Image (cartoon, helix red, strand yellow):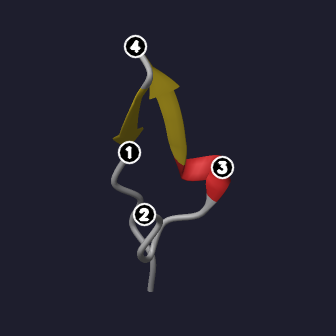
Amino acid sequence: SKSAYTPAHYTRQNNADVFVPAVVG
């Protein structure tokens, strides 16, 4: 589930969605 994150800010590892916090604003 991509909340405030974009596909460019998240990556898939071990078939798991690992979201990388990005400073927006």
Residue matched to label 4: 14
Residue matched to label 3: 8
In the rendering, which numbered label is found on residue 4?
A: none
For disc 3, the neighbor class at 10 Å (few under 14, some 14 to 19, many from 20) is few
**Which residue is farthest front?**
15
Rounded to the nearest angstrom, the CA distance separating label 4 from label 1 is 15 Å
Rounded to the nearest angstrom, the CA distance separating label 3 from label 2 is 14 Å
| Label 2 element class | loop
The residue under the point 60% across, 63% down is 6
Q: Position of residue 17 (x, y in %)?
A: 40, 38
- Labels 3 and 1: the sequence-earlier one: 3
- Labels 3 and 2: the sequence-earlier one: 2
**Which residue is farthest top?**
14
Front of the two marks 4 and 3: 4
For disc 2, the neighbor class at 10 Å (few under 14, some 14 to 19, many from 20) is few
Tell me which amino acid carries mark 1.
Val
Q: Is residue 1 above or below residue 17?
A: below
